[in-house]
Structures are given as structure tokens and as C-alpha cells.
Image: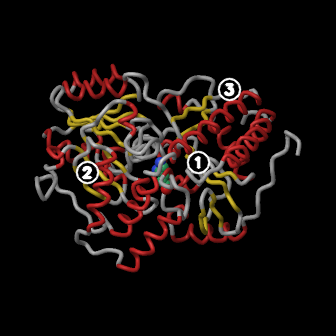
Amino acid sequence: MSATQAKAKPERRRSREIFEKAEKVLVGGVNSPVRAFRSVGGEPLIIEKGSGQYLYDADGNELLDYVCSWGAMLLGHAHPAVSAAIAEQARRGTSFGVTTELELQLATLITKAIPFIEKVRFVSSGTEATMSAVRLARGITKRDFIIKFEGCYHGHADSFLSQAGSGLLTLGIAECPGVPQALAALTLNVPYNDLPGVEKLFSEYKGRIAAVIVEPVAANMGVVLPKEGFLQGLRDLTRKNGALLIIDEVITGFRLHNGAVQTLLGVQGDLTTMGKIIGGGVPVAAYGGSAELMNNVAPLGPVYQAGTLAGNPLAMSAGIATMGELAKPGLYDGVNALAKKLVHGLGNALAGAGIPAQVNSMGSLSTIFFTPEPVTDHNGARNSDTKRYARYFREMLNRGIFLAPSQFEAAFVSAAHTPADIDRTISSAQEVLKFIAAQPRE
Ligand code: HOZ
């Protein structure tokens, strides 16, 4: 194949049929917008099964997966220990609506791995975790305003849907209709990494800000790293102003090492939100912090939050089995070494093709931005040539490599990926990037 030819698409007749039928009964054919591939074009995937680092679509095509259920599948798909734990629990019952010892076990594993979290409350999605953490911060401080950062994404609760990342950035929704204006006005947005901007808001809204919520490594506008001193600055400003710091580790928790990324970055939030990996691919999320703060949640305190499926035994079993694997020596060293090799190889492939770009990364999280300028915030991320990203995505998919179907998400390496997978990805990227460089800009 010459550098000027696109690779033919694999046949996906059955997937297309399923998607066309799904469009009639599911909104956009999907249950989460970015899965519709609207910003990258091409046909949305219909997946039949996953195994290790691979997904298999409804037509039997194999895909090397770097989406990993948006980061949840750090161990890869259908990991034997996790699948066995789920199957075993399914035989014992899937939901009781009262406490099981499994909840104690998973909470203990989390609090041991993140010692500054003394108590957790399990919920079923990252959205619930962040929404509840903000409610708790408001309840404790008796203040209404929150500060969040443009391009960060904290799920889809009403307070988080302005200037948000992930699907909103992908679809160009800056403000979400349906969020009451009175509530939206309580969310103050600042560019990521803009500490003076935060300081200014604290002086403008003196005594009125309940919390600052932040992704410690932003991964929902693509990967954007915190600048030196940014997180510590937030820590200092929140303390000085009597506000709480909520660190959203739904993506970063247990991804970069066996615990919170806060530990690696030398900062501690008052409240931490988690999700994805702690459930091993079954819906689990949590928020936690010191006993003193968490004791304000009902039934010990008046801040109400509840859920029929919270602490669900199937999900707890998957989480416990996952945490058991994460504690095995060498697991993170292996994943991070593979990811480093990938990032290095992609950087070389971009340079070799003469394409100006940034590869932002930390551990097993990375994003290519097709822009010559460093990407340190939402505006920088939006400067990326998203048409180039879309073409890169489609050509990689045609070679059996599944990347995030949006510029504004991360690529995730799992423990199931192998050095050979990384070599194959880099050589495919070399071919694709040369092809892209030879095309007229769209
Ligand atoms: N908002 C998720 C990624 N950051 C996407 C969830 C999904 O589509 O499954």
C-alpha cells in the first residue's frame, strides 16, 4: 500500500444492521453520546465480546482496544479472576438492598490504598460520586458556589454541564439546556492551570465558595497535565478561604499507581471521588474523605444521599477481585513501561511524518493533539485539528486499532496489552501519519 492510499474498511454488515435498529429505540443508537462516533465519522462499533486487550465486534472483527471502557478495564476485558468473582456472586444473588461484608472489604481495600481517605460511600456512577461530593461540601460549608475548570468533566449532574469536557466538548455543547439558570450561575469556571483566575474568584465571591472540584490530571479534554504548583495552589487557596478541595479521581484513581494520583502529585483533597477501575468494569463509584467530613452524610449527618444499587454485591465482588490483581507486584511498572514505549513511538511517528503535534501523557493515559502549541488548558485542546484526529482515528480503526472516538478523551493502555501490541500500534501509526501528512488539510 502506498502512503497516499487509505486502508479499506473491514466489513461490518451485521454491526450496521444492529445500529440501524438501535437508532429506532435508543437515542442516537447509543446510551452515551460519544459512542455515536459523531465527531470522528465512520460507523459506530457494536461489540459482542471482549477478551484481554481485544474487543470483537458483531461481525467478528478483532480490535486492539485503547478505550478500555473509558479507562475502567485496567486489567483488560474478561479478566479470569474478575469474571470468576462476578459469576460466583451471581450465583449467590445480585442485589439485596442491605449491607454485605463485600462492601466492608472493598472499602477497606480502598482506605488502605489511600490512607487519607478514612471513610467512603459507594454509589453506582462517577456522576453520582461528584454530585454527592459537591452536595456534601455545600452542606458542610453552608455555601452555594463551586469552582470548576473549563474542559474538566465531572459527569452529567446539573452543576457540571457548563464549559465541560468529554462528550460536551466533543459535541460543542458549551451550556446544557435544561439546567436551571439559577443553578448554573452557582458554577464558576476557570481555565485549567489558571491559579490567579481561582484566586480572583475567591476574592470576588468571598465567603461564598463551597468547593473547588478538579481532575488532578485532566483526561476529559484529552490529557492535560497540571502545571507545577497548580494543585498545591488550589490546596492553599481552598484552605485559606474555608472551602473544600474535591479531587475527582474517577479516571486517575488506581490508574497510575495502586492508589490515588494525589499521592504521586503530593497533594491531598478534602474529598476524593472515584469510579471506573474500582468496579473492574461493573458500575461502582465512591466518594470519600476524613471521617470528620464524611460523618456529615446520612445517616450520621443531615446531607442526604442514597441508592438501591449502591454497594451492589456483584459490583463489589468485581471491585475486590480487581483490587487483588492491582496489588500484585510489578503490575503498574509493566503498564506504565508499555505506555511510555507507546508515547515515545507515537512522538517519533509524528516527527517522522512531519506533523506538528503534542503527545500529552502521564503513565497509561495519553492523547495526541494535532497542534504545534503545548496544550495546557481547554483553549489549547480546542486548537487541535480535530479533522486530522478524526482521520487518524478512522485509519487506525481500519487497521484494527480502536482509539477514543473523540479528540477530547484519553487513550488507555491496560495490563493486558503486550510489547508486540505496542509495536504494532506504533507501526500502524507511522503508516497512518504518513498517509495523513500526504493528504490536503480538510
Ligand atoms: N464520558 C465518558 C468518557 N469520559 C464516556 C462514557 C461512555 O460513553 O461510555
- Residue 260 on image: x %, y %: 37, 42
Q: Write down the quadrant of residue 292 in the picture.
A: top left
Q: CA distance from mark 3 to mark 1?
A: 20 Å
Task: Give the residue type at disc 2.
Answer: Ser
For marks 2 and 1 on the same chain, the one whose residue lies earlier in the sequence: 2
Q: CA distance from mark 2 to mark 1?
A: 28 Å
Q: Residue furthest left?
A: 301
The C terminus lies in which quarter of the figure? top right
Task: Give the residue type at disc 1.
Answer: Ala
Q: Residues within 10 Å of mark 3 (few under 14, many from 20)?
A: few
Query: For the image shown, how many numbered marks are present on the structure?
Result: 3
For label 3, the residue is 356
SS of the residue at dot 1? loop
Mark yes or no: residue 228 visible. yes
- Residue 85 on image: x %, y %: 43, 69
- Label 1 CB sits under 8 Å from any ligand 1 atom: yes
For marks 3 and 2 on the same chain, the one whose residue lies earlier in the sequence: 2
- Mark 2 touching mark 1, by CB under 8 A? no
For label 2, the residue is 132
Q: Residues within 10 Å of mark 2 (few under 14, many from 20)?
A: many
SS of the residue at dot 3? loop
Residue drawn 55% across and 57% down?
Answer: 76
For label 1, the residue is 404
Which numbered tag is attached to residue 126? none
On the picture, is 403 further left or further right than 208? right
Residue drawn 56% across and 38% down?
Answer: 366
Residue drawn 11% across and 53% down?
Answer: 301
73 and 354: which is toward the camera = 73
- Residue 181 on image: x %, y %: 28, 43
For marks 3 and 1 on the same chain, the one whose residue lies earlier in the sequence: 3
Task: Give the residue type at disc 3.
Answer: Pro
